[in-house]
Amino acid sequence: METKSVMICGVGGQGILLASDLLSQTMLEVGMDVKKSEVHGMSQRGGTVISNVRFGEKVFSPLIRKGDAEIILAFEKLEGLRQIEYLKKNGVVLVNNFVIEPLPVACGLAEYPEDVISIIKSSIPDAIVIDALSLAKKAGNARSMNIVLLGVLAKKLEIDKKIWYYVIEKRVPKKTWEVNKRAFDLGYEVI
Amino acid sequence: MKVLLSGNEAVARGAYEGGCRFAAAYPGTPSTEILENIAKYKDVIYCEWSTNEKVALEVATGASFAGARALAAMKHVGLNVAADPFFSLSYIGSTGGIIIVSADDPGMHSSQNEQDNRHYARSAKLAMLEPSDSQEAKEFTILGFEISEDFDTPLLLRLSTRLCHSKTVVELGERKEVPVKGYEKDIKKRLVLPAHARLRHIYVEERLKKLSKFSEQFEYNKMEFNDKSIGIISSGIAYQYAKEVLPDASYLKLSFTYPLPFKLIEKFSKNVKKLYVIEENDPFLEMEIKAKGINVIGKEIIPITGELNPSIISEAFGKKRKSVTIKKMPSLSPRPPALCPGCSHTPVFYTLNKLKLTVTGDIGCYTLGALPPLNAIDTCVEMGASLGNAFGMEKVLGEKSDKKIVAVIGDSTFFHSGITPLINIVYNKGTSTVIILDNRITAMTGHQEHPGTGKTLMGEDTVTINPEDIVKACGVKHVFTVDPYNLKELKKVIKREVERKEPSVIIARRPCILLLIRKREVGKPFYVDTEECIGCKICLQLGCPAISMKNEKAYINELFCVGCGVCAQLCPIDNTMIQRENDS
C-alpha cells in the first residue's frame, strides 16, 4: 500500500495531539508502518498546531510535503485555510466550522477573513464542513469535539470501527468511554 | 512488542534497556520528555532535574566515575552551558559509559538560535551518533553506552526537534543489567591538571584514530545502492526526508557521524555519478568530505537556515508536487503563542510597559511579554542573561539614562543561572532592580519541578528553597514579595524600587495558572455589562486571550476566563467587568 498522509491542524488546546495519537495507534493496530510528527513547546500557548500522520507499508519522512496530503482535517477553519498548500490535487478537506480568533485579531491588530468556508470551497468544492461543537454537545461534552472530528476522518479511512473503539478505550479514562464513543459515532455519520 | 514512541521516549527506553543507572537534565524543548520518561523507570534508574545543564553533566560524570552507566540530556543551547565539563570529560573519558544527549532545534521552534551541535563532537574530539527515527534512537542509546565504555570516550547522541517529537514504530526489548564497576582512584585519568591533561590529549588523538576505524565498519553506516546516477550522503532525520523525495537514488546513510568513515565515503563516491550531501543546517558532513578532496554538492541547493523538510528537498531536485491553490487567498492573521488567560506574568508586563521602563528579559514563557500588545521586553539573550545585561547597561548609561532599567527572570531560570549575576550586581556596587517572576514551576517546558517546588523528578518531597532567602544571602537588602494580581501594589513597588540607589529584588509570586486550573483552584469567569462598557479598549492592552471586542464593546470568552480580575482593575467604569457568582 502506498503511503498515505493526513494533516490535522488547529489551535493549541483543541485536543489535536490526542486525535492524532488515536489515528496513529489505529494504523499501528492494523499492521501498518506509522510516523507522526508535531512540535511541542511554544505552540501549546494558543498557537497553531499541526500534526502530520503518515502510514503505509514503509514510511520514511514523518513530515508531509506540500501537495502530498490525501486529507486535511482542520479543527479550526482559518488554520485549515493556512495549510491548504499541503493538500494533494483531488485531496479531501474536512473542516470544522469553528472560529478561534488569533490574538492579533482579538486585539484589533488584524482581521479574521469573513468567508473562510467559501474561500476554501472556491478551490475545493467538495470540502466537507462540520459543526463539531454541536455534535460534541449532543454527545454529552463540548470537549469531545476532537473525537467527533476523528469520527469524521475515520469514515474516510475504511478501518473497522471496532478497532477505533479499542484504541479509544485503551487511551481515555473509563468514565469518558461512552461520551467519546458517542462523539465518534456522531462524527462517523456526518458523511 | 511494537509501540509508537517519540524520539525522546525512545532514548528513555534505550537508557532503560541499556542498563543506565543515572540520568540528569535541565528541562528544555525539544529534549524535556527524555527525563520525564526515564522517570518511569525510577526503580532502576536514579534520575533528577538538575539546577542547570552544567550541573546535570557534572553529576552524570560523577556517576560515571563511580562506574555506572550515566546519561545527561539537554537542548542544544544547554550544551553551551555544559560545555566546560563536556570538554574536560573528553580527556577524562568514561568509566561507566556516559552519553550526552543534545537535542538541536532547527527552525527554532522554541529556541534563541539554531546552532548545529555536531560541531561540538569535532571540537571536543569525541564519538557522535545520529539516529534517524525512534527505533534507532533507542538502539543508539544502548550502543552509545557500549561504545563509550569500549573506547573510553563520552558519546554525543545528537537529536533534532523532528526526531525528538515524531512518533515512529519501536520494537521493545528487555533491560540488560550492567553492574556498577565501582570507583578506583586514577588521578592521571580523572584529575586534569596540565601534567596529566597533556598525556590525555595524546590519548584523545589516538582514540580518534581508533574511532575512525570503528566508524568504517559500523553497521549503521551503510550503503544502499539503487540508481547510481545520483548518490546521496545523509544522516539523521534528513535521511528520511531524502528517501521520501528520492526513493530511487543510491544512499550512504551515516549514523556514526564523528569521526566519519572516509574510506567508506570514498568508496561510495566512486560508485555513483553525481554526489550530494543532504543535511540540515550547517554543512558539517559536506565540509569534512570536501576537506578530503571529494567533490560533493550540498549547500548550493539545500539551505543552511531554517528547518529542513521534504518540500525543500523536492524543490531542490525539481520534484515539486502540484498542490491545491486558493484563487483569492486573503491575508491570514498569524497565530503567535500568547500568555495564558490569568497568567501571573501579564500584569507585571502591563505595568512595566505603562511605566515605560527598559526591560532586560530572560528565557521562559515570559519572553512572550515582548509581543504586542504588552511590548514590555527589550532584550533576551540566554538563560540568566537579564541580570548581567541590566547591570552592564546601567553602568554605562547611569544617570544619563532617561529610562530606568529592570531585569525580569523566572523562578526556574533564577535557580538555573540567575544567582551568580545577582552576586555580581551586589559585589560590583550595582543599583539594578530585578523582578523574579515566581510562578512556582518550570512552566514553558510543561511544568517540571525545580528547587523551589518542594518535589523532585522522582516524585519525592524535598526542601523548598525560597528565592527570598537566596537573594538576601547574596547581600541584597531590599527584597519585596508582591502578588502580581494586585496591580496598584505592583506598580507602587516597581516605581519605588527603580528609583532606589541600591540593588533591589521584587518577587512577583503567584502559581502558574495552568497549575491552578489543574487543581480547579481558579475563580469564576467575568463577563462584561454591555450597558456600562464605553468601548475604551483599555482591557485589550493586557493581551489576554479571553478578551476581545464585539459590537464596539469588550467581550470576555467565559470558556477561557479564569477570573483573575486584572481586567476589572483596569476598567475605568465601575461594575462593568462583573464576576459570575455561579457557573454560567
Image (cartoon, coloured by chain):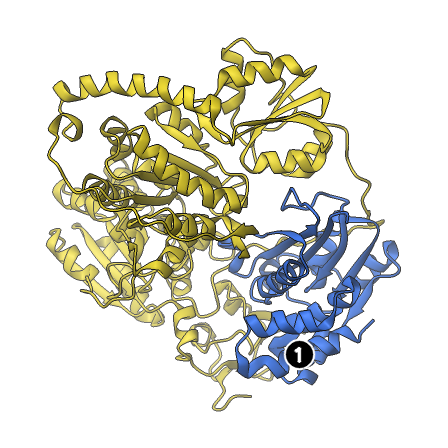
Chain colours: A blue, B yellow
What residue is rendered at 64% in x and 66% in y? A100
Residue closest to the eye, B394 or A191: A191
Residue closest to the eye, A46 or B158: B158
Residue B62 in the image: above or below residue B302: below
Q: Identity of the amino acid at label 1?
A: Lys
Residue B382 in the image: above or below residue A104: above
Q: Position of residue B507 (x, y in %)?
A: 26, 62
**Which chain hosts label 1?**
A
Instruction: State left or right for residue A91 relative to residue B481.
Output: right
Query: Circle 1 sits on which residue?
Result: A181
- Location of residue B333 (image quadrant): bottom right
Q: Is residue B406 visible?
A: no
Instruction: State left or right for residue B424 relative to residue B42.
Output: left
Residue closest to the eye, B507 or B264: B264
Instruction: State left or right for residue B541 relative to residue B313.
Output: left
Total numbered circles: 1
Helix, strand or loop at label 1? It is: helix
What residue is rendered at 16% in x and 56% in y? B470
